[in-house]
Amino acid sequence: MTDLEKHQRMANAIRFLAIDAVEKAKSGHPGLPMGAADIATVLFTEFLKFDPTSPNWADRDRFVLSAGHGSMLLYSLLYLLGYEDFSLEEIKNFRQIGARTAGHPEFGHGAGIETTTGPLGQGLGNAVGMAIAEKLQESRFGKDIVDHFTYVLAGDGCLMEGISQEALSLAGHLKLNKLIVIWDDNGISIDGAVSITDSTDQVARFSASGWNTISVDGHDPAAIAGAIRQAQSSDSPTLIAAKTTIGFGSPKKAGTNGVHGAPLGTDEVAATREALNWPHEPFEVPSDILDAWRIAGLRSAQAHKDWEKRFAEKDGETRAEFERRNRGDLPAGFAAAVQDYKKQLAAEKPTMATRKASEAVLGVLNEVIPETIGGSADLTGSNNTKTKQTLPVTPDDFSGRYIHWGIREH
């Protein structure tokens, strides 16, 4: 079996788990997983840094499926890679009450899902936040323990949503070079061709917002890998415009809105199996292909061990602080500081406008909680959100704690 044949069979495992799950549920979106399977296979088997046996490892790469309706892509990957929360039984229970495979990825319901996605564009916005967080944390704790990428798979709908412009323009301004957005450019939305509603040159739009842009054939694994390598070395965030065919492999429905939000149907499932040479029963993944996926899941095990060693070499105070912040625990002095300030207010009974009161309270909180990040949508002097502890975050300096969001209301 050649490398290309192996890739195709591994990608087809994603496609048919998605096809079979949607068919069994009589509900769902098979088109995106079928079209984006080649992209996902390259990303997860060659590039993404993660450990299914330790899904919350702090320095893992983040993968955000912004086009959340294509959830079977992510669920299939998590099963194939060996994440404990996503058994074959969960795949078979797609969109059933109580299942982790809810129909849109839901954070907290299963390890491997980084954020809840459903409203289009939201995942892209969350990912910009994750990329900001990575740079903030790297500036505080060092590149030896904070050095990971944030990858996004976004669809046409994500890029049409207004929030996408606010998010991507801020990402370009802040030079979030470890943010890589892969656009599943299939030209189809539920109503039909995207050209019915939109004629934006998305590559030009991202480029104008300070992004590195690359266009590739989303079904050519070598081209996809080359694009990701180029993106990883960029000094700007990168858009990879990957031209794909929605519902890839379906003889009658590929490239149409017929695979966006509806099962293929029994006859078309059979025809797709024949077209893609997948002579296996529903939900069956051949043992050699499942083994290949499970091996891919362990690809970063050594990187994780190396990270653990570097982390152990940090002084105890640094390790404790890093772990506290990542857990979300408040610092030890928080309760006393708040109690002392309440006593001061009770004794002095100051008279001040609510915005000044807010600023005063923020000053107390920012002093005792070093990880607070503030900001304002171009109203700093009016809403008093900046305190003496919060120096600005700039494209070239993430040691600060105040982000000038500009007029971006989201």
Image: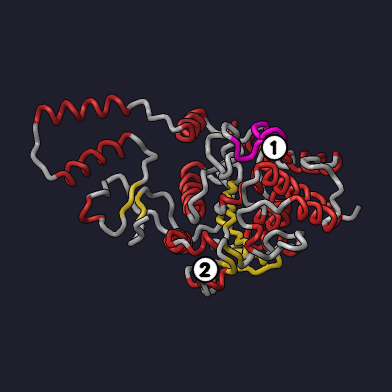
Which residue, given by chain and number where applicable, does mark 2 sit on? 206
Q: Up-down: is 135 above or below 321?
A: below
Q: Quarter-wise, where is residue 359 in the image?
A: top left
Q: Which residue is drawn at 60% across and 48% down?
A: 63
- Assign a secondary structure to mark 2: helix
**Amino acid identity at mark 2:** Phe
**Mark earlier in primary sequence (2, 1):** 1
Visible in this render: residue 102?
yes
Left or right of 293? Residue 60 is left
Which residues are the magenta region? 81-96
Which residue, given by chain and number where applicable, does mark 1 sit on? 92
Q: Up-down: is 151 above or below 185?
A: above
Q: Up-down: is 326 above or below 390?
A: above
Residue 86 in magenta? yes
Q: Report how far apart the C-alphas of labels 2 and 1 lie in the structure.
A: 39 Å
Q: Which residue is drawn at 49% across and 56% down?
A: 121
Few, some or many residues within 10 Å of mark 1 (<14, 14–19, 20+): many
What type of secondary structure mainly makes up the magenta span? Answer: loop
**Amino acid identity at mark 1:** Lys
